[in-house]
Image (cartoon, rainbow, N blue to C red):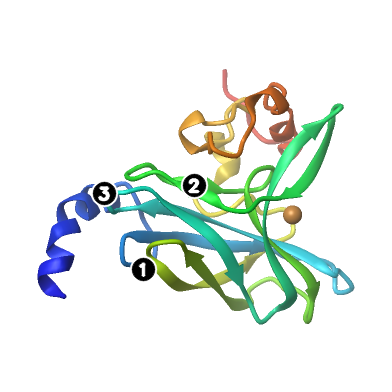
Amino acid sequence: MIARLAAVAVAATVALGALCGPAAAAEGVAATDAWARAGAPAAKAGAAFLTLTNQGAAADRLVAAESPVADKTELHTHLMDNGVMKMRPVDAIELPPGSPVMLKPGGLHVMFLGLKQPLTEGARFPVTLVFEKAGRLTVDVTVQGAAAMGPGGMGAGAMGQGHMNPGHMNPGHMNPGHMGQGGMMNQAPAGTPQKQ
Ligand SMILES: [Cu+2]
């Protein structure tokens, strides 16, 4: 076990250097900054977001997610369809070695259908991620405010001008032809400072 872990230690150290906050790791995949957006008390659907970093040498895939908060938990993405942003289930989320994949509002997300309880700000709940190679990993999801954009103060310039960060996109499932010009990200909250 120790020897086996040592084999990935170098890659893991490099990958972790760029991350902050509490991390959970299955063998080879780290999950950080898991959060969800608070929903209305009657809401039947919700979503969670997080960053996945494949620290192994080989590609892996997130193939499923499970959570006790909902009847059904799916992997979704957003696609532009005739100028309308729509959600669509995906079979898997590709995790190339060494490059973080960000699940975030307007993009890939973990979808909850048939919520058994409202997602109230400050609450925490578990989500179990199932990776093709790395196995199962349970992360703690923290519910943030209804207008939250995620950890790290996304409103303070991190949103930029609505550009999608190509490094975080998933070529295996995100069809650039459907992505428009980053239109999905133009929903940045009004009043967000946009420095030139
Ligand atoms: Cu969805």
Residue occupying the point 63% across, 74% down: 122
Hey, which quadrant is residue 161 in on the image? top right
Residue occupying the point 51% across, 47% down: 102
Taking the image as drawn, is residue 23 in sight? Answer: no
x, y percent for residue 115 = 79, 75
Q: Residue furthest right?
A: 42
- Residue 43, above or below 177: below
Look at mark 2 in the image and give the residue it sits on.
Answer: 94
How crowded is the residue under tag 3: few (<14 C-alpha within 10 Å), some, or many (20+)?
some
Q: Looking at the image, tell me whether mark 1 or mark 3 is earlier in sequence order.
A: 1
Report the amino acid beneath label 2: Glu
How crowded is the residue under tag 1: few (<14 C-alpha within 10 Å), some, or many (20+)?
some
- Distance (Cα) linking label 2 and label 1: 16 Å
Report the amino acid beneath label 3: Ala
Residue occupying the point 72% across, 27% down: 178
Residue 57 - label: 3
Look at mark 1 in the image and give the residue it sits on.
Answer: 26
Say whether marks 2 and 1 touch (CB < 8 Å).
no
- Residue 163, above or below 144: above
- Distance (Cα) linking label 1 and label 3: 14 Å
Q: Quadrant of the C terminus?
A: top right
Residue occupying the point 55% across, 60% down: 63
SS state under label 3: loop
x, y percent for residue 154 = 57, 44
x, y percent for residue 140 = 51, 74
